[in-house]
Image (cartoon, grey):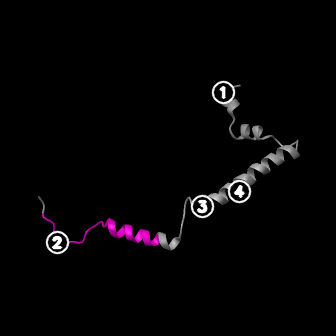
Amino acid sequence: PLKKDPMEKPKFNAIEDNRKAMLDAEERGPQGFTEYAEKVNGRLAMMGFVSGLVTEVVNKTHPTIYDQMLTIFPITKLLNL
């Protein structure tokens, strides 16, 4: 077996890197799927859904959601219909 030099500094210190990352995360604050972020996301999604429904009912000349989806995803062209 190869003997390591006891004075050699380790090239990768996972424990120290992990400790630094945890301290950085504490300074940034909570991120990701926090309760507040989920509430805001849900409320914005509800507002978008309701505005889409209102547009469908109020403006008859506006393309329907179904027509808009066919514009984005042209299924009929893919199926040669």
Write the residue at 36% across / 68% down. 17
Identify the secondary structure beneath mark 2. Answer: loop
| Circle nearer the viewer, 2 or 4 | 4
Identify the secondary structure beneath mark 3. Answer: helix
- The x and y percentages for residue 7 are 18, 74
Comparing 80 with 14, the one in front is 14
Whether the magenta-drawn stretch holds residue 22 is answered as: yes
| 49 left or right, relative to 24 | right
Label 3 sits on residue: 35
Label 1 sits on residue: 79
Identify the secondary structure beneath mark 4. Answer: helix
Q: Quadrant of the N terminus?
A: bottom left
Comparing 73 with 53, the one in front is 53
In the current view of this chain or complex, which residue is farthest to the top? 81
| Circle nearer the viewer, 3 or 4 | 3
In the current view of this chain or complex, which residue is farthest to the front? 35
| Circle nearer the viewer, 4 or 1 | 4
The residue type indicated by label 2 comes to Pro
**Magenta part of the protein: which range?**
3-24
The residue type indicated by label 3 comes to Glu
Write the residue at 25% across / 68% down. 10
